[in-house]
């Protein structure tokens, strides 16, 4: 008798399963997102890939179906604090909150060609004293070796496995028992318990579940590379981001040398940290002081340029804001920001016109955050406003002046957080004066600061000082 094949319909957006096709997903309300996939009649037994604590040393798998769980008091839960795995990559350590947590599942997403595989291979080679299993479903062993020869690290404890079947991968894991596991990529893996094609919603969800279960049961951290869609989100069901412990986004322009590693979710640390790399022929170089690089191409005497301070997690950054305000000749004025929120720029333009009398409604406005960064910190508002006025008046600002304040709808200058860190960073980079909100200097010891701090209350006050 032939084995019965079951079919099910999965939402490509959220992973919702339905026995029949539906035009609209009842969970995420997405239209035309259901696809049909084939399933085997037999389901996998729970815990097929589970390992006991004792099996970590021996490599012997046990069947979790014979084990039972029962509720216990929270203060009776056995807890052993394990030290994080500290890599030689300080940028990654900062983004992860201090290093790789044992038993964690980390997902790294990014556009094709941005350098995800290079970053993961570089991390694998830098973990000296740790057995690392690098599983590749996209490249051959020869291609990985060629990339490894270009990188500045080398390790005899890094093993390469070119396989996509999860059952075969876990068979090798049983023999090797690695300390760290890297998957490149999760969309290429297939589970023997499903008939769906690699990269489908059900396959991605099932393979990720098996890897996460393995990581939690054995304490082995698993680093997974994930593809992204054209909208910039991780490919596969949205539930994938909920399943893993940490979601990192590796972003940047492929035509530029700098890459940004940004945290989108982190159960073991802050979600506002950021790491910066420079793509070179020998791999990814860590940028320990990004402010110097972001400000290295400034020219004195140019209008429309202002320096602002932002906080990315615990790291202060000084970024360059470039503006171009020119009379519109094509009817409707253009508003084109790069690296800055368009709605926020329109709000600041309205504040300038209403509160300060600058007639910008017939001017094209182009705004750019230099270095390819995307800034969301409100402390950059004053630098954006000053840059717009500088371009409109065609008057340059001193290159030793920077700004750190938020601008309100009434044209008032509002205080920002961690002003001491911003001032110290500006002083370290050689700036002579800094405009801040008058509400920020309360409790600030100006005698210990070698930079001139100028407290201001309104945008009109700032314009009078700089452009009178």
Image (spheres, rainbow, N blue to C red):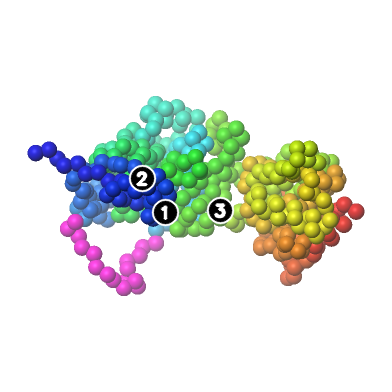
Q: Quadrant of the N terminus?
A: top left
Q: Nearer the viewer, residue 326 or 250?
A: 326
Q: Which residue is mark 2?
A: 34
Q: Is residue 435 visible?
A: no
Q: Earlier in the sequence, mark 2 or mark 1?
A: 1
Task: Give the quadrant of residue 189.
Answer: top left
Q: Which mark is residue 273?
A: 3
- Secondary element at tag 2: strand
Q: Is residue 84 above or below residue 133?
A: below
Q: Is residue 216 visible?
A: yes
Relative image position of residue 403 (x, y in whole percent)? 75, 55
Task: Give the quadrant of residue 353.
Answer: bottom right
Q: Is residue 133 above or below residue 281?
A: below
Q: Which residue is mark 1?
A: 28
Relative image position of residue 207 (x, y in whole percent)? 32, 45
The stretch of residues the image draws in magenta is: 65-81
For the point 90% across and 53% down, the residue is: 468
- Residue 335 is covered by the magenta coloring: no
């Amino acid at each position: 008798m032939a084995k019965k094949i079951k079919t099910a319909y999965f939402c490509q957006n959220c992973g919702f399963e339905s026995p029949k096709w539906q035009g609209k997903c009842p969970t995420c309300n997405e239209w035309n997102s259901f696809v049909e996939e084939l399933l085997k009649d037999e389901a996998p037994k729970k815990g097929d890939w589970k390992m006991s604590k004792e099996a970590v040393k021996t490599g012997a798998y046990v069947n979790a179906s014979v084990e039972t769980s029962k509720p216990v008091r929270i203060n009776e839960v056995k807890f052993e604090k394990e030290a994080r795995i500290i890599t030689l990559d300080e940028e990654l350590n900062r983004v992860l909150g201090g290093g790789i947590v044992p038993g964690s599942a980390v997902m790294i997403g990014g556009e094709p060609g941005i350098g995800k595989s290079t970053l993961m291979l570089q991390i694998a080679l830098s973990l000296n004293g740790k057995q690392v299993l690098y599983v590749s479903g996209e490249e051959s062993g020869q291609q990985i070796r060629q990339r490894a020869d270009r990188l500045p690290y080398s390790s005899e404890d890094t093993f390469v496995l070119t396989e996509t079947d999860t059952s075969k991968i876990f068979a090798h894991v049983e023999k090797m028992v690695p300390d760290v596991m890297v998957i490149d990529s999760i969309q290429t893996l297939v589970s023997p318990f499903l008939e769906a094609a690699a990269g489908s919603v059900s396959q991605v969800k099932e393979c990720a579940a098996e890897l996460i279960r393995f990581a939690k049961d054995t304490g082995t951290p698993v680093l997974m590379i994930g593809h992204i869609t054209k909208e910039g989100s991780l490919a596969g069901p949205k539930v994938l981001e909920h399943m893993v412990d940490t979601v990192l986004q590796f972003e940047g322009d492929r035509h530029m040398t700098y890459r940004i590693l940004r945290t989108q979710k982190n159960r073991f640390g802050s979600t506002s940290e950021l790491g910066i790399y420079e793509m070179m022929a020998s791999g990814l170089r860590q940028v320990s002081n990004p402010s110097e690089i972001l400000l290295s191409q400034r020219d004195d005497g140019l209008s429309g340029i202002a320096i602002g301070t932002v906080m990315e997690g615990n790291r202060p950054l000084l970024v360059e804001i470039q503006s171009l305000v020119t009379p519109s000749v094509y009817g409707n004025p253009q508003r084109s920001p790069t690296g800055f929120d368009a709605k926020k720029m329109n709000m600041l333009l309205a504040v300038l016109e209403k509160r300060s009398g600058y007639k910008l409604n017939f001017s094209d406005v182009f705004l750019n955050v230099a270095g390819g960064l995307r800034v969301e910190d409100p402390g950059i508002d004053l630098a954006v406003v000053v840059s717009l006025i500088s371009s409109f008046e065609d008057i340059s600002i001193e290159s030793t002046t920077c700004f750190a304040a938020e601008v309100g709808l009434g044209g008032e200058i509002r205080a920002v957080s961690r002003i001491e860190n911003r001032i110290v960073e500006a002083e370290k980079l050689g700036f002579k004066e800094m405009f801040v909100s008058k509400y920020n200097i309360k409790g600030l010891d100006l005698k210990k600061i070698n930079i001139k701090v100028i407290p201001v209350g309104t945008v009109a006050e700032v314009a009078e000082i700089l452009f009178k």
